[in-house]
Image: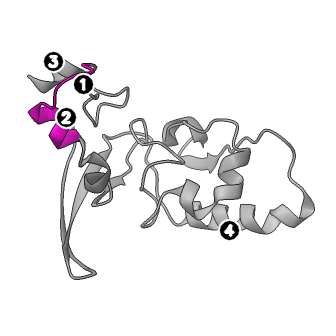
Amino acid sequence: MIKAKYGIDELGWWSKKSSYSHGFGCWKYILAGLERFKSLVHFETKDGSRVLFWHDVWCGDRSLKTLFPNRFRMARLKYATVQEVVSWNGDISYWNLTFVRSLNDWEADSICNLLAVLAAKEVLSQGKDEIVFLCLSGHHRQDSYGWHA
């Protein structure tokens, strides 16, 4: 019903906001907490087709745009999915990061750090991405529950 009434985003995870300018319906109230909800989940990347490379939390506990803000500002494709940034040569994946300008020598360390973070994360050539809820007790992760759409 929500999908039919409000639609969903292009990746299929979140409902769109109400386009009505008046009133304060139930769904507007629920969506007001969406950013808080997003802070309590992360993505398990399979093929990366539904996970935003820079914006979503999929590689560590923060988004890559938060970890590497200077590289994000230089990124040519700020809303690329993981699938759009990873390339395959047989079973071997490599990262195809593009920027709006060539890197300066002093920026090489941050690119190496970004590539080190990416090297620690496995991306598969197939499979459905999943969103994982973190169940927190204090500040420690106890368990997680996931689903895929």
Instruction: Give the residue at x 64% y 57%.
Output: 69
Check the image and report above or below for 56 versus 111.
above
Circle 1 residue: 18
Find the magenta span and give its range: 20-31
Where on the picture, by quarter, is residue 10? top left
Check the image and report above or below for 112 versus 43.
below
- Nearer to us of marks 2 and 3 is 2
- Nearer to us of marks 4 and 2 is 2
- Numbered circle sitting on residue 5: 3
The answer for how far apart the CA atoms under marks 2 and 1 are is: 7 Å
The answer for how far apart the CA atoms under marks 4 and 3 are is: 43 Å
Where on the picture, by quarter, is residue 113? bottom right
> Could you tell me if the residues under marks 2 and 1 are in contact, i.e. CB atoms within 8 Å?
yes
Q: Amino acid at mark 2?
A: Lys
Circle 2 residue: 28
N-terminal-most mark, 2 or 3: 3
Q: Amino acid at mark 3?
A: Lys
N-terminal-most mark, 1 or 3: 3
Instruction: Give the residue at x 33% y 41%.
Output: 127
Q: How many marks?
A: 4
Check the image and report above or below for 33 versus 108.
above
- Numbered circle sitting on residue 108: none
